[in-house]
């Protein structure tokens, strides 16, 4: 027998993923802004010995979808795959949430309602008559606080109970006389034609003019009568706004339920959110405050992750290296194994692992921002400026996500229903510096700018944003002409981020970083090590090794940017599979070259670079070709090979030009 | 931009004042309220606005209208609309 399925459906930011995590024990990404979840996620749980599947979906406002993420949800709901739907509703925002509910009821879906965030509603002195609500909506209603796992047991029980009663319930809505009249005819036309949807509901969708469903209907039948009927209806009624009439009936229903079952305070409580917003989205203060917040994030990242904790991680890795070396020589291990373990693994992969505290702190801070509700505000304050560069505020959220990792940043562009907006957002995403580049900057900062870590980092990120904007403008003028799409953004209430979800989001990223160190970075460093110690005739780690020869070929490419040695070029090359490998490769090569005990990466970097070439190198790293994971995501999202290739090339050129300019202008000004 | 319209007709419920004054959302100042009367923002945007509560006769209160998108409160929920879009939302001022 097929495992029974429960689907979570609801408006964006109503707490679906939080509930999903609570029910299934998964660790999916949660954030206090609309658009966090952009794809279908599956999990499962057992209840009374039986196993159940749970499907978490991107948020939707209605069953008419425009953007990729919404289409995923809508298609899933239409597919009728789930045995029951848990409709997650934000209790402090009931009318709008019920609008979607009415559409699920229109479809005759098997629905159980999770009235979520009742804690927040309580704080705003909103109370509910749950029995009346269940009666009005013809389905069970369970109050929940998903973030504290309250009510999850009960909602599971109700959902499982509802699975048995798979009856088509009747549609509780009443439509205007006009619409009802046409509905009758259309339903008659569609009945008994073997269509994939119930005729009554299909009739509503046809009259509403839902192009997605109509296309589906037309594709699913050869019946000329049906096709002609639909076409003629729309030709005949092109000037009527049946859509609005149907929307109004749905809202009338939602309002009626709300009126009968929700009690709000006479005078609306002025919330803390309103007070905070007076400052954070203020006309003059908005962008400066954003800059200050980012500066604070980087200063804290350095102060805590590097100065305070960084030393411990380094000591740990070094200590482990010494112990391993002793162990290997005690066991009379062959020289090549010692060399591989110490130069390759410890100085290569270990050099990356040392940065775990640093990126942990940064991901903690970014998760905190995400869960606070500030993201939507950042989109708000940047919308105006973004528009001047041919983009819109929503794209700015993707850009901030990119500070963590470029892959989800590119995927978050799915929420844009305008193709041009989406493409431009994806194309500029690599300029937002990601967490994997942090170790690289960190080494160079320690070598040359030790007392200005936060500031240097902030400037690099800011430079990335500026370049992203400029490129956006360029794309807007050339490949993707036209206006940016409308801006609609919900501003959710500020929330004190829960420790649980901040730590969870941080761990999602940090565990990924550690996993990459043990997999792709390990592989890259191993290959680099092999190339560096072969052929046998050459002195290991010298210019005569295979790697040395390859690097020597690359030297002319980077000479104008001031990178004079083969190691530097080769490391950039190694960074294309994954960015951390730049540090891993430099660590391995320098350690091998200097041979002597404890040759620190930082000291080696000081010998090979100057402050100016270090800066040029960091700029190159910031901008040049993104990692393989990013390129393959672009390929998947655009369903093409051309775009990722174009991206790999154009970012390389931009990075190279910028690095050369930094070096040349710096040299002219007399820096060295 | 203020447009004077004819008297409210029988089948709508704008009848509180006799004269219905339609203004665009961008013309409302902070703290002013209105009832949605018409939206003409193209198929997608109009539909999206309907869905998030800007249907006929929904009450809207302006929270912020200076630079940048207009922020309104609708059904106790805060929503920001880009100025170009807000301009296409017509309301009966209350
Ligand atoms: N106060 C409160 N916050 C919640 C509750 N459920 C979820 N949240 C928060 O609401 C935000 C959105 O949650 P998320 O699960 O990402 O929503 P989704 O977009 O529907 O998947 C997050 O900041 C959660 O921490 C709840 O019951 N009470
Ligand atoms: Mg979600």
Image (tube, grey):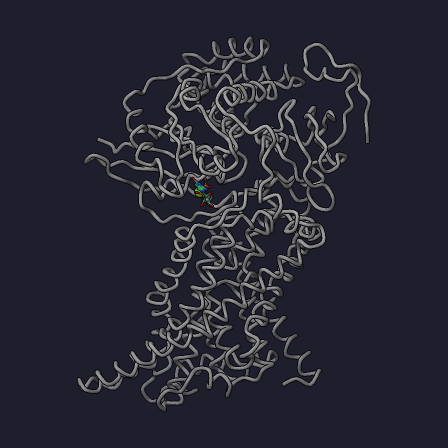
Nearer the observer, A517 or A551: A517
Q: Quadrant of ligand 2?
A: top left
The furthest residue to the left:
A331
Quick check: A120 above or below A665?
A: above
The x and y percentages for residue B19 are 79, 18
Q: Is residue B56 left or right of residue B3?
A: left
Q: Residue at x 34, y 28 (%)?
A: A84
Q: In terms of image quadrants, where is residue A665? A: bottom right
Looking at the image, is A307 positioned above or below residue A654?
Answer: below
Residue A401 visible? The answer is yes
Give the quadrant of residue A526.
bottom left
- Position of A474 relative to A340 (above/below): above
Q: Nearer the viewer, residue A450 or A624?
A: A450
Task: Give x and y (percent) for residue A216.
Answer: 47, 26
Residue A411 visible in this rendered orientation of the protein: no
Q: Residue A510, position in %: x, y?
A: 39, 61
Position of residue A91 measured from the top left corner of the image (x, y, whole percent):
48, 32
The residue nearer to you, when weighing A27 against A514, is: A27
Q: Is A190 rendered above or below residue A47?
A: above
Which image quarter is the N terminus of chain A in? top left
When asked about the image quadrant of residue B31, the answer is: top right
């Amino acid at each position: 027998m097929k495992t029974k399925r429960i689907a979570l459906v609801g408006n964006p930011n109503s707490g679906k993923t939080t509930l999903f995590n609570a029910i299934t024990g998964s660790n999916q990404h949660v954030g206090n802004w609309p658009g966090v979840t952009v794809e279908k996620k599956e999990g499962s749980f057992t209840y009374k010995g039986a196993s159940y599947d749970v499907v978490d979906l991107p948020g939707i406002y209605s069953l008419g979808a425009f953007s990729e993420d919404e289409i995923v949800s809508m298609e899933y709901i239409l597919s009728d795959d789930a045995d029951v739907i848990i409709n997650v509703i934000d209790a402090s925002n009931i009318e709008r949430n019920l609008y979607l509910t009415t559409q699920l009821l229109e479809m005759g879906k098997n629905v159980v309602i999770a009235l979520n965030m009742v804690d927040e509603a309580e704080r705003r002195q909103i109370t509910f008559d749950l029995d009346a609500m269940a009666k009005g909506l013809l389905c069970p209603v369970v109050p929940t606080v998903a973030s504290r796992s309250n009510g999850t047991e009960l909602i599971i029980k109700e959902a499982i109970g509802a699975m048995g009663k798979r009856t088509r319930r009747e549609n509780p809505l009443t439509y205007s006389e006009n619409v009802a009249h046409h509905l009758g005819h259309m339903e008659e036309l569609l009945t008994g034609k073997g269509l994939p949807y119930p005729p009554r509901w299909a009739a509503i969708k046809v009259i509403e003019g839902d192009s997605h469903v109509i296309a589906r209907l037309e594709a699913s039948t050869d019946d000329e009568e049906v096709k002609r009927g639909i076409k003629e209806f729309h030709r005949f009624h092109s000037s009527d706004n049946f859509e609005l009439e149907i929307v109004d009936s749905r809202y009338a229903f939602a309002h009626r339920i709300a009126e009968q079952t929700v009690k709000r305070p006479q005078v609306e409580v002025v919330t803390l959110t309103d007070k905070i917003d007076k400052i954070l989205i203020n006309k003059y203060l908005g962008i400066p405050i954003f800059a200050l917040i980012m500066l604070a994030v980087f200063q804290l990242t350095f102060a805590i992750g590097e100065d305070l904790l960084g030393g411990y991680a380094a000591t740990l890795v070094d200590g482990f290296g010494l112990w391993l070396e002793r162990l290997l020589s005690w066991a009379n291990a062959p020289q090549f194994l010692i060399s591989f373990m110490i130069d390759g693994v410890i100085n290569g992969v270990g050099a990356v692992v040392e940065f775990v505290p640093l990126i942990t702190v940064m991901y903690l801070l970014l998760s905190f921002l995400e869960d606070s509700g500030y993201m939507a505000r950042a989109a708000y304050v940047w919308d105006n400026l973004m528009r001047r560069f041919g983009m819109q505020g929503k794209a700015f959220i993707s850009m901030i996500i990119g500070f963590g990792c470029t892959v989800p940043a590119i995927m978050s562009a799915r929420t844009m229903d305008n193709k041009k907006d989406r493409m431009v957002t994806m194309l500029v995403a690599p300029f937002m510096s990601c967490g994997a580049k942090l170790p690289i900057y960190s080494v160079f900062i320690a070598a040359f700018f030790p007392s200005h870590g936060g500031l240097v980092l902030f400037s690099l990120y800011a430079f990335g944003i500026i370049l992203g904007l400029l490129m956006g403008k360029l794309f807007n003028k050339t490949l993707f002409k036209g206006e940016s799409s409308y801006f609609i953004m919900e501003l959710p209430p500020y929330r004190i981020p829960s420790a649980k979800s901040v730590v969870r989001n941080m761990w999602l990223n940090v565990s990924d970083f550690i996993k990459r160190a043990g997999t792709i970075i390990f592989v890259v460093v191993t290959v680099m090590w092999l190339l560096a110690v072969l052929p046998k005739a050459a002195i290991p780690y010298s210019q005569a090794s295979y790697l040395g020869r390859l690097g020597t070929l690359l030297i002319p490419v980077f000479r104008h940017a001031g990178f004079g040695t083969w190691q530097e070029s080769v490391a950039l090359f190694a960074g294309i599979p994954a960015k951390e490998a730049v540090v891993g490769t430099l660590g391995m090569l320098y350690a091998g070259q200097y041979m002597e005990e404890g040759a620190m990466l930082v000291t080696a970097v000081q010998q090979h670079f100057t402050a100016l070439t270090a800066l040029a190198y960091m700029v190159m790293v910031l901008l040049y070709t993104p990692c393989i994971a990013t390129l393959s995501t672009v390929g998947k999202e655009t369903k093409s090979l051309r775009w990722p290739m174009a991206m790999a090339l154009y970012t390389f050129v931009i990075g190279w030009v910028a690095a050369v300019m930094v070096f040349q202008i710096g040299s002219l000004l007399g820096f060295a | 931009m203020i447009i004077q319209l004819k008297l409210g007709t029988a089948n709508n419920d704008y009848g509180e004042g006799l004269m219905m004054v339609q203004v665009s959302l961008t013309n409302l100042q902070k703290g002013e309220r209105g009832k949605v009367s018409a939206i003409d923002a193209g198929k997608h945007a109009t539909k999206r606005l309907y869905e998030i509560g800007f249907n006929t006769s929904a009450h809207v209160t302006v929270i912020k209208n200076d630079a940048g998108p207009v922020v309104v409160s609708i059904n106790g929920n805060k929503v920001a609309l880009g100025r170009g879009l807000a301009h296409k939302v017509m309301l009966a001022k209350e």
